[in-house]
Image: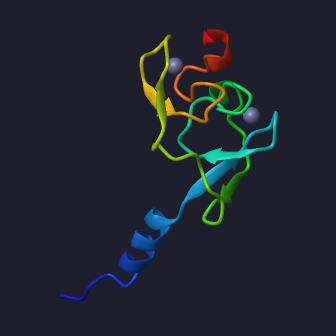
Amino acid sequence: MKLNPNLKNVTNVKKLTLGKVCPSCHYIVPVHERYCYHCGLNFMKHARCAVVDAGKHSFPTMRDTQTCPKCHHKISGTNRYCNYCGYDMLKNQ
Ligand SMILES: [Zn+2]
Ligand SMILES: [Zn+2]
């Protein structure tokens, strides 16, 4: 049985870091995010974001975390907005 030669390519695609360009603030955020953590934009309402290869782009690390008071998800400490619910973290201070 021959291995599918496309299989290797599929693996490569999965390893690719995909980002999307926020139509509001033009920052690149990970493609799976529901809310922009720079400006709080709801991506559900903006389905047509440009998807880019974000391999060279560094996203916030989870080394320093904060807990969203609204949805109680742990998010990166550098996030201005919660990427799960769009909560403005500065309101909490
Ligand atoms: Zn944004
Ligand atoms: Zn939240």
Counting from the top left corner in percent of width and height, residue 29 is at: 64, 45
Q: Is residue 72 above or below residue 34?
A: above
Q: Residue furthest left?
A: 1
Counting from the top left corner in percent of width and height, residue 89 is at: 62, 19
Instruction: Give me the residue at 66% from left, 28% from top.
Output: 80
Q: Quadrant of residue 18?
A: bottom right
Q: Is residue 73 above or below residue 4?
A: above
Instruction: Give me the residue at 46% from left, 42% from top.
Output: 62
The front one of 74 and 17 is: 74
The front one of 82 and 62 is: 62
Q: Position of 1 compared to 7: left or right?
A: left
The front one of 90 and 18 is: 90
Q: Is residue 58 above or below residue 79?
A: below
- Point out the image quarter for the C terminus: top right
Q: Position of 48 compared to 8: left or right?
A: right
Q: Quadrant of residue 81?
A: top right
State the count of labels.
0
Instruction: Give me the residue at 62% from left, 56% from top.
Output: 58
Q: Quadrant of ligand 1?
A: top right
Q: Quadrant of residue 85?
A: top right
How is colour applied across the structure in the image?
rainbow
Instruction: Give me the residue at 49% from left, 12% from top.
Output: 69
Counting from the top left corner in percent of width and height, residue 33 is at: 56, 37
- Point out the image quarter for the N terminus: bottom left
Q: Position of 80 compared to 22: left or right?
A: left
Counting from the top left corner in percent of width and height, residue 36 is at: 66, 32
